[in-house]
Amino acid sequence: METKNEERKERRIGTRQMVGNLLAERQEMLVAYCRLAGLEPYHPDKPVKRQVEEFCQLLMDYTAFGHFELYRRISEGNERRARVAKVARLVYPQIEEVTEKAVEFNDKYDASDHALKLDSLPNDLSGLGEQLALRLELEERLVKALLHEIAGGDGH
């Protein structure tokens, strides 16, 4: 019995750390997004290329963290709490769509292998911002379920 309580406590700590890391990654990406959006209008004399590259890197880090740390755990059936699994099943398809849009943005604007063209950046950044807002809403539902289950018990 004591071993089960210790395991449960460790899982709770792990979940809190995972959520904290996700939120930190998300915050860093959002700051970079705002910084990049604040450069408009985009001119070559502004540090646009560096800001775009930084944002793309943070966007991919955040996206990958969510996918590999949180959503993979759920999609592989490793989430034992029914309420969390239910919320995840509801939100994950939409989160996956947003992830695809983020990857498309990165492929277009990560200028490490091609010239950076800025003419459609304002529209693309705006569209991505809408997608990211949707992802944040969906993630919040999942984070609340995860943290509620920790605070309120396992919910088995």
Image: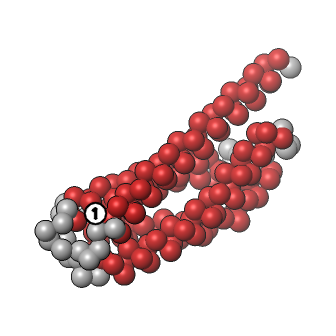
Quarter where residue 107 is shown: bottom left
Identify the residue position indicated by label 1 in the image: 52
Q: Is residue 94 left or right of residue 109?
A: right
Q: Residue at x 45, y 58 (%)?
A: 30
Task: Give the colouring mode of the picture.
Answer: secondary structure
152 shown above or below 140: above
* 51 up-or-down from 74: above or below: below
The residue at the far top in this view is: 2
Residue at the image position 33 percent from the left and 78 percent from the top: 122
For the N terminus, which image quadrant? top right
Q: What is the x, y in percent for residue 132?
A: 50, 67
Instruction: Say which of 25 and 154 sits in front.
Output: 25
Q: Nearer the viewer, residue 50 or 142?
A: 50
Name the one closer to the observer, 151 or 156: 151
Q: Amino acid at mark 1?
A: Val
Visible residue check, residue 98: no
**In the picture, residue 33 is in which quadrant?**
bottom left
Residue 86 in the figure: left or right of residue 104 = right
**Is residue 28 rendered to the left or right of residue 44?**
right
| Residue 46 appears in the figure | yes
Q: State how many labels appear.
A: 1
Is 71 left or right of 132, judged from the image as shown?
right
Q: Residue at x 19, y 62 (%)?
A: 47
Query: Residue 39 at what x, y percent from top left?
Result: 28, 68
Q: Position of residue 68 (x, y in %)?
A: 51, 49
Within 10 angstroms of label 1, few (less than 14), some, or many (20 or more) residues?
many
Tell me the residue at 71%/52% (across/down).
144
- Mark 1 residue element: helix
Which quarter of the image is occupied by the C terminus?
Answer: top right
